[in-house]
Image (cartoon, rainbow, N blue to C red):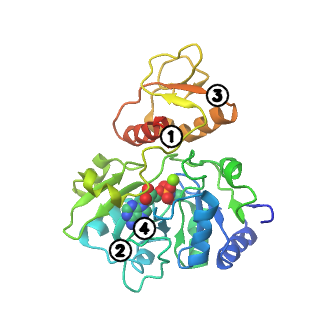
């Protein structure tokens, strides 16, 4: 493939990006969570290209990105609970899993043969404009090589995928920095949390009155991408470290002395926004052993700890 185009916010660049997608090419898109690697969700070939570029296992389905609730309803019927969620949190870092409509124009490659689809309305002006111009759902996982650290800046995308994708749209660093919260809405109205993310369970309760059940292990196969080892940096990670050993670099949180501190003031939103960027930097610096300060498991801290646990897990 020729070298990857760097696109910006101009109307010409938006046009180019939409045209690449129509040709079945891959375009990395900015979102408020992490950068996505997008393709036409209706095209088997285009979607297959995502799996090939990332080295992603084909049993792991992709999220369909749409511009609003009305567009989402082309792909799935929204029961009352799902509608409440969408109205409260879209655009924003929430993916809703629902059975897809029979007439949904979605490639079975992107849904990995499941009967459900993950729908998300990202909160980023450039991507919103691109989806509207393309007028179809974009299948998009995070724009990293499978199993590696998710990208929160265009340079992270290019580190793994330069030359393997058509273009990356530079929309600046991602505001939130960890992936969307994934909630499955079951036919009986039960809401299951499949992945902690940018929206905490307490925020769901406060905004909608709805309670989330934890995903049970037996339902675990429904979140096929939630593999134990994921987000892996080159170095090893030791969690809940109150200090670094001599051969370790400390990835700090709160009032600890470290050149790499996720949030010196102990702000969890700031720590989430810095997490993947700092992990990328330690990777680039070739750091072999990383010790990580304890992070409180509340709010978005749950999502941070979920990603850290996977990053620290033994590799397969
Ligand atoms: O914030 C995000 O969600 C980012 C940005 C790019 O939108 N996307 C993202 O995609 O994190 P990805 O592919 O890295 O993670 C999607 C997760 C995977 O764990 C996948 O298994 C799960 O969503 N998933 C997708 N469709 C599903 C479905 N129908 N049922 C259950 N899990 C599903
Ligand atoms: Mg991912």
Q: What is the CA distance from the residue labelled 2 to the residue labelled 1?
A: 30 Å
Q: Which residue is mark 3?
A: 287
Q: Position of residue 104 (x, y in %)?
A: 43, 82
Q: Residue furthest bottom?
A: 103
Q: Which residue is mark 1?
A: 315
Of the two numbered discs 1 and 4 on the same chain, state the one appearing first in sequence.
4
Which quadrant of the frame does ligand 1 lie within? bottom left
State the quadrant of the N terminus: bottom right
Mark 4 in CB contact with mark 3 (< 8 angstroms): no
All told, the count of numbered labels is 4
Q: Nearer the viewer, residue 80 or 24?
A: 24
Q: Is residue 252 above or below residue 20?
A: above
**Image point 44% across, 35% down: which residue?**
268
Q: Is residue 44 above or below residue 35?
A: below
In this rendering, does residue 206 appear at all? yes
**Image point 60% across, 58% down: which residue?**
54
Q: What is the CA distance from the residue labelled 3 to the residue labelled 2?
A: 42 Å
Mark 4 in CB contact with mark 2 (< 8 angstroms): no
Q: What is the CA distance from the residue labelled 4 to the residue labelled 3?
A: 37 Å
Mark 2 Cα within 10 Å, few/some/many (few <14, many 20+)? Answer: few
Mark 2 in CB contact with mark 1 (< 8 angstroms): no
Q: What is the CA distance from the residue labelled 4 to the residue labelled 2?
A: 13 Å
Would residue 77 appear left or right of 62 to someone viewing this image?
A: left
Q: Position of residue 153 (x, y in %)?
A: 64, 48
Q: Give the quadrant of residue 16.
A: bottom right
Judged by depth in the image, the label closer to the viewer, 1 or 3, is 1
Judged by depth in the image, the label closer to the viewer, 4 or 2, is 2
Q: Which residue is mark 4?
A: 119
């Amino acid at each position: 493939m020729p070298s990857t185009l760097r696109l910006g916010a101009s109307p010409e660049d938006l046009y180019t990006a939409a045209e690449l997608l129509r040709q079945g090419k891959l375009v990395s898109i900015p979102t408020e969570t992490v950068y996505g690697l997008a393709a036409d969700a209706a095209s088997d070939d285009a979607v297959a290209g995502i799996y090939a570029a990332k080295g992603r296992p084909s049993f792991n389905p992709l999220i369909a990105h749409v511009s609003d609730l009305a567009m989402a309803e082309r792909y799935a019927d929204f029961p009352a609970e799902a509608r409440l969620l969408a109205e409260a949190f879209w655009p924003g870092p929430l993916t809703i899993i629902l059975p897809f409509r029979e007439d949904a124009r979605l490639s079975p490659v992107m849904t990995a043969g499941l009967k459900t689809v993950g729908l998300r309305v990202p909160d980023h002006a450039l991507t919103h404009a691109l989806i509207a111009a393309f007028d179809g759902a974009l299948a998009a996982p995070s724009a990293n090589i499978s199993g590696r650290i998710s990208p929160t800046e265009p340079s992270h995308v290019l580190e793994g995928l330069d030359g393997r994708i058509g273009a990356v749209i530079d929309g600046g660093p991602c505001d939130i920095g960890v992936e969307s919260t994934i909630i499955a809405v079951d036919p009986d109205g039960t809401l299951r949390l499949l992945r902690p993310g940018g929206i905490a369970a307490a925020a769901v309760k406060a905004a909608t009155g709805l309670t989330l059940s934890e995903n049970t292990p037996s339902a675990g196969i429904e979140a096929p991408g939630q593999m134990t080892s994921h987000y892996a940096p080159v170095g090893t990670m030791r969690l809940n470290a109150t200090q670094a050993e001599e051969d370790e670099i400390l990835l700090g949180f709160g009032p600890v002395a470290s050149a790499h501190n996720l949030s010196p003031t102990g702000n969890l939103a700031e720590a989430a926004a810095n997490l993947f960027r700092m992990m990328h930097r330690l990777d680039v610096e070739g750091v072999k052993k990383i010790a990580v300060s304890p992070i409180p498991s509340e709010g978005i801290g749950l999502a941070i700890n979920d990603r850290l646990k996977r990053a620290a897990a033994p590799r397969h």
